[in-house]
Image (spheres, rainbow, N blue to C red):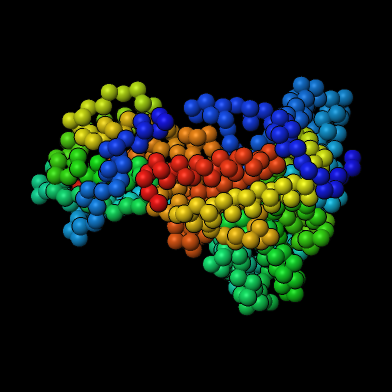
Amino acid sequence: MNLSNMYQEVILDHYKSPRGKGLQETFGGEAHHVNTTCGDEITVRVQLSEDGNSIKKISYASTGCSISQASASIMFEQIDGKNLTDFNKSSEEFLAMMQSKGKFEPNEDLLGDGVSMIGVAQYPARIKCALLSWMAAKDAIIRAKGE
Amino acid sequence: MTISDSKIKLDIKKIQLDFPILAREVRNNRKLIYLDSAATSQKPQVVIDAQNRFYETINSGVHRGAYYLAELATDAHEHAREIISGFINIKPDQLIFTKNATESINLLSYAFLNATLKSKTDAAVDKRLVLNAGDEILVSELEHHANLVPWQELCLKTGAVLKWIPITDQGLLDYSKVDELIGVKTKIVSISHMSNVLGSITDIELIRKAAKSVNAFFFIDACQSVPHMPVDFTKLGADAIVWSGHKMLGPLGIGLLAATTELLDIMPPFITGGSMIETVSMQKSTFAKAPKKFEAGTPPAAEAVGLGAAVEYLQKIGMQNVHDHERHLTKLMVDGLKNIEGVTIYGPTDDRERGSTVSFALNGLHPHDVGQVLDDMGIAVRVGNHCARPIMDKLKVQSTTRASTYIYNDDSDIEALLDGINEVFKFFGAR
Ligand SMILES: Cc1ncc(COP(=O)(O)O)c(C=O)c1O
């Protein structure tokens, strides 16, 4: 089954034991995103550092398929505590990978376990699932900045 | 042509050969097992050919030319109308071609809006179509968004109030609530004949009686019934029914509205422009009678012709035979699903109360993941909310997996689905 390209062990592991799941009470910005095709939902909360340059704490609550759940967990691991420049780099790398139809050499420094999502990029119907958490995080950051 | 509704054992293998797409391979060179006909059906070669033949031999402006080809095209278009109207036992001019069922329902809802707006300046508007604040529109909790959102919009614009018949835990309408929900304020009752999610079949006669006891208009969303069972418009006793051609072996882009002559006479047009007028001056226009009044612009004539061929194809098989075959498949599917540990079936499990559209869950697994693994085996099912969010809320799920059949499915397709489901459980190591 070439399905295992999509459902790599790492992904199933994040799906079964998601990291950092659960919303924090203190936050500067929140975003709620829905994947209208399958009803997957995520709420992301972001608390920025005093100087506004880095993510002090990111938290999320979500329901959905293995891909969207694993993606949120992987994103959490990758960006919690990072500065916004790093977040932007990671988020752009992830987006580029998802839009690549699978023809991409993902940068592990930027994506961490996210590199395992390369197989998902071959399934157009699932790209939205993988991007859901990243898009919500981006929005939550914008709101936290008060832009 | 004769309608052969006699009981025969259908040769499904032979029927499958009529559908070219069933011969193709999908992911991993797997044979296609198409179990998503509730979304859209596949097309037999005769339909594809009829549509192509229109373009190859008679393509021209329907109702818009005095030359030979235009006559042939017009004839073909109107002949299709005759075939399709005969199929549900109405006169040809009671049948309106639209783009899809969604447009057909909007045609109805906008008739009420337009009548309500026009009534302020035009005394000739039929008062039965005029909605006042506090008037009520009744739908059910299991409607497809197409038979819900247009009525919500109509309520917002007129001050009418939307009410709905709730569904029971078995996924049937809670008929015990009908009497209290229908009253003198009820102006419109619009209910689906068969749920596109749960497969439940509505007791139309019960709803019709209730609607007519208060002189409300009674509309039926027949999207999931006309393709799968014999439907006689006259026997249903509705003022109008809507459905889509693409779900009954016909082409995409053509939908239908069948209505009583009386309703068609009093409804103002929805979309206006060319082909639907009687006289036009710079100041004002008068409209043609139905069906033209509701068919503005150049019509999708090739699609109408294709749909005519689809109906003839179904008539040859016989709708009772279609229904019997699908009931057999439904029983096989429901019984099979019941026997798999960890599967929850939504909706009625008695095959007398349901059609062949079955929603289910693999406990602990998300439908998107279920659909993906099935897809890997060549099995096409629908996952999602099926354009019926309120049912999802009622079931307390985000989405379901749905398998639905048609005349080209056979026992082996159902067996493949059941085997596939076991594979899905294995793949994710869950149950
Ligand atoms: C019950 C029901 N009503 C309405 C519709 C809308 O049909 P269409 O999308 O062809 O307009 C559908 C199908 O999608 C349906 O299943």
The quarter of the rendered structure image containing the N terminus of chain B is top right
On the image, the x and y values in percent for residue B332 come to 62, 50
**Is B350 located above or below residue A18 in the figure?**
below
Q: Residue at coordinates 35% horizontally, 42% vertically from top-left?
A: A67
Q: Residue at coordinates 24% horizontally, 52% vertically from top-left?
A: A21
In the rendered image, the residue lying farthest to the left is A50
In the rendered image, the residue lying farthest to the right is B1
Q: Nearer the viewer, residue B408 or A41?
A: B408
User: Is residue B53 in sight in this rendering?
Assistant: yes
Q: Residue at coordinates 21% horizontally, 29% vertically from top-left?
A: A108
On the image, the x and y values in percent for residue B144 come to 58, 54
Q: Nearer the viewer, residue B40 or B272?
A: B40
On the image, the x and y values in percent for residue A76 come to 22, 45
Where residue A126 sits, quadrant-wise, is: top left
- Total numbered badges shown on the rendered structure: 0
User: Is residue A71 in sight in this rendering?
Assistant: no
- Is B72 displayed left or right of B351 in the figure? right
Q: Residue at coordinates 81% horizontally, 45% vertically from top-left?
A: B8
- Is B338 displayed left or right of B263 in the figure? left
On the image, the x and y values in percent for residue B195 come to 61, 56
- Is A40 displayed left or right of B43 in the figure? left
**Is B388 located above or below residue B381 in the figure?**
below
Where residue B158 sits, quadrant-wise, is: bottom right
